[in-house]
């Protein structure tokens, strides 16, 4: 392995690396021992506290699975609604008319700059005050609305970056065969940019899944975290055990999504049929930042 | 007219709440910069065990929702294990726990930002540096790190802004920051739209200038390749 930071190790560096490994191993072992001891002190390692997750199917059917279902429903709804909205605003930001660009840009910048929790709290109160959404449905509505407002603005940037990532030749060619602006967008740019931005979309899904937990903690949305919390009352104060299970489920779910995103990215980058344009999974962090603008290839619009 | 419209602000410490938000952001930013740099050093180190630990930490922590981590610091660390971080009253304990949770979470993203900065430096740079006879410390301090630091400003700015927005999650354990106050005000006052607009504006004032300023700095210092 070559690294920009260091050479291939020689005999002395190898000895030093072994020493570092041993020191680090000791430190790590001390840390693990300390954690295990403090858990054991508080009787959190007793089998009775962990047992329900392995032997009692009711722990799964009454608490974990319904919660996971709500998490997935919330995340899927938010994604499905946010995507067309985001596409709309992303395209509007590339409009030839300054006022369309201006309005879309302001809306996108506004919602990217605000924490998603503020949007959820607002949506929750707004549904209570201005609509007759039943109180038991209100948390789901509020969570999805908050997630949609925030993620649509992030996805707008993803869509914009996707369109901008296409080679300029695509625009030129469609102009040359006499396409209108709308036709060019519908038949040439959008279909290709959808493929290009798939990795970014999947990794934005990870953000959405994680943010549903906010609704569980603060709006009473019965997602995974919220529905596992009452378990410690019914299964003998197994807080550590239940949090571990929740964390493991989230990690597995999101790790699968992340792996899928980077597999897609690799496939698209190597693809022979496509233009090779791709909005990577890592680009999402940048696109979620207010004030940050992407201009790949130094171009501002695809029609220059 | 002004007195009538903004009557509902009476009795609420708006600036105080946003000050707590700023404090949460600053303490967590400093903490996660330190822990994140250590993690990045581990992930870039020649020792496989350290690399493994760094990669494992980042992949586990960034896939757990921040809400789960923050709620765990209160229910798990404090109430179950009795970790109070040297504070006596609930207000300080919750604040410190929130900062701890925020550091644990954000440092994973800091680590990734730093690593991506190191990765933007082409291997040819250090190979050329070695070829002209620079020693290892010279390669690092004269060639690699200056380029890495410059390209890391942008990604770190993104992490900082995400952190500023994420501090609202501390409302889940009752830290008296902006989102907590917003919840309280929405409950007690009838001015929903106006209250929300004020808090939205507050966060825009925190995040937008940071984004614009650091975006400008990162473009200014960027290494052209």
Image (spheres, coloured by chain):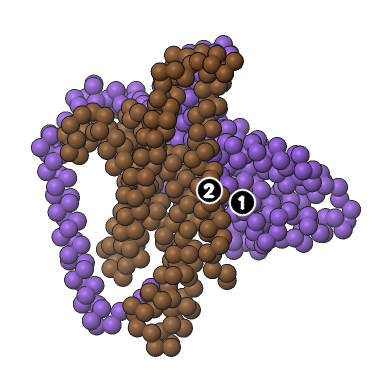
Residue A91 is drawn in which quadrant?
top right
As measured in the structure, the alpha-carbon distance from the residue carrying label 2 to the one carrying label 1 is 10 Å
Most distant residue in the right direction? A178
Q: Which residue is mark 1?
A: A293
Residue A117 or A175: which is nearer the viewer? A117
Chain A colour in the picture = purple
- How many other residues sit within 10 Å of disc 2, few (<14), some (14-19) or many (≥20)? many
Residue ID at (51%, 53%): B214
| Residue A106 image offset from top left, x and y in percent | 65, 38
The subunit letter for the residue under badge 1 reads A
Residue B74 is drawn in which quadrant?
top left
Q: Which residue is mark 2?
A: B211
| Residue B148 image offset from top left, x and y in percent | 45, 67
| Residue A117 image offset from top left, x and y in percent | 46, 31
Q: Quadrant of the C terminus of chain A?
A: bottom right
A180 displayed left or right of A188: right
Residue ID at (14%, 47%): A34
B86 displayed left or right of B163: left
- How many other residues sit within 10 Å of disc 1, few (<14), some (14-19) or many (≥20)? some
Report how many numbered discs are placed on residues in the image.
Answer: 2
Residue ID at (19%, 35%): B87
B85 displayed left or right of A62: left
Q: Secondary structure at mark 1?
A: loop
Residue A22 or A187: which is nearer the viewer? A22
Chain B colour in the picture = brown
Residue ID at (24%, 72%): A17
Residue B54, numbered label = none
Q: Is residue A84 above or below residue B118?
A: above
Q: Quadrant of the N terminus of chain A?
A: bottom left
Q: Is residue A69 above or below residue A39?
A: above
Q: Can see residue A112?
A: yes
């Amino acid at each position: 392995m070559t690294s920009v930071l260091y050479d291939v190790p020689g005999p002395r560096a190898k000895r030093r690396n072994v020493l570092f490994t041993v020191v680090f191993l000791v430190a790590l072992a001390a840390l693990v021992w300390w954690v295990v001891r403090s858990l054991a002190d508080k009787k959190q390692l007793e089998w009775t506290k962990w047992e329900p997750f392995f032997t009692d199917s009711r722990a799964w059917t009454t608490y974990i699975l319904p919660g996971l279902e709500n998490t997935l429903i919330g995340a899927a709804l938010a994604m499905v609604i946010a995507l067309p909205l985001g596409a709309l605003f992303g395209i509007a930001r590339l409009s030839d008319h300054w006022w369309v660009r201006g309005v879309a840009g302001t809306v996108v910048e506004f919602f990217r700059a605000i924490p998603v929790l503020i949007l959820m709290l607002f949506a929750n109160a707004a549904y209570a005050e201005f609509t007759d959404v039943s109180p038991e449905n209100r948390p789901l509505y509020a969570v999805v609305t908050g997630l949609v407002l925030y993620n649509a603005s992030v996805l707008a940037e993803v869509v914009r970056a996707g369109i901008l990532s296409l080679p300029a030749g695509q625009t030129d060619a469609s102009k040359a065969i006499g396409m209108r602006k709308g036709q060019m967008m519908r038949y040439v740019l959008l279909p290709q940019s959808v493929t290009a931005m798939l990795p970014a979309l999947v990794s934005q899904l990870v953000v959405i899944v994680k943010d549903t937990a906010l609704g569980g903690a603060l709006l009473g949305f019965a997602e995974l975290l919220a529905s596992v919390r009452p378990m410690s009352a019914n299964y003998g104060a197994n807080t550590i055990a239940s949090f571990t299970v929740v964390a493991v489920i989230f990690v597995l779910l999101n790790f699968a999504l992340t792996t899928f995103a980077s597999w897609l990215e690799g496939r698209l980058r190597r693809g022979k049929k496509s233009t090779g344009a791709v909005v990577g999974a890592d680009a999402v962090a940048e696109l979620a930042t207010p004030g940050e603008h992407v201009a790949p290839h130094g171009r501002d619009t695809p029609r220059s | 007219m002004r007195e009538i419209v903004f009557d509902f602000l009476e009795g609420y410490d708006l600036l105080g709440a946003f000050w707590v938000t700023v404090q949460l952001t600053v303490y967590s930013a400093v903490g996660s910069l330190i822990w994140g740099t250590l993690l990045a050093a581990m992930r870039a180190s020649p020792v496989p065990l350290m690399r493994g630990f760094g990669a494992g930490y980042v992949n586990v922590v960034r896939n757990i929702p921040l809400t789960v981590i923050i709620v765990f610091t209160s229910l798990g660390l404090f109430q179950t294990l009795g970790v109070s971080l040297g504070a006596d009253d609930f207000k300080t304990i919750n604040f410190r726990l929130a900062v701890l949770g925020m550091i644990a979470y954000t440092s994973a993203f800091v680590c990734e930002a730093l690593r991506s900065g190191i990765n933007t430096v082409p291997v040819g740079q250090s190979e050329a540096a070695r070829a002209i006879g620079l020693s290892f410390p010279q390669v690092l301090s004269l060639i690699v790190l200056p380029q890495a630091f410059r390209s890391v400003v942008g990604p770190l700015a993104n992490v900082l802004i995400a952190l500023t927005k994420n501090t609202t999650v501390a409302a889940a354990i009752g830290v008296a920051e902006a989102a907590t106050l917003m919840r309280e005000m929405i409950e007690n006052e009838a001015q929903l739209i106006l209250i929300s607009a004020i808090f939205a504006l507050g966060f825009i004032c925190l995040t937008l200038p940071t984004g614009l300023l650091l975006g400008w700095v990162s473009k200014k210092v960027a290494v052209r390749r």
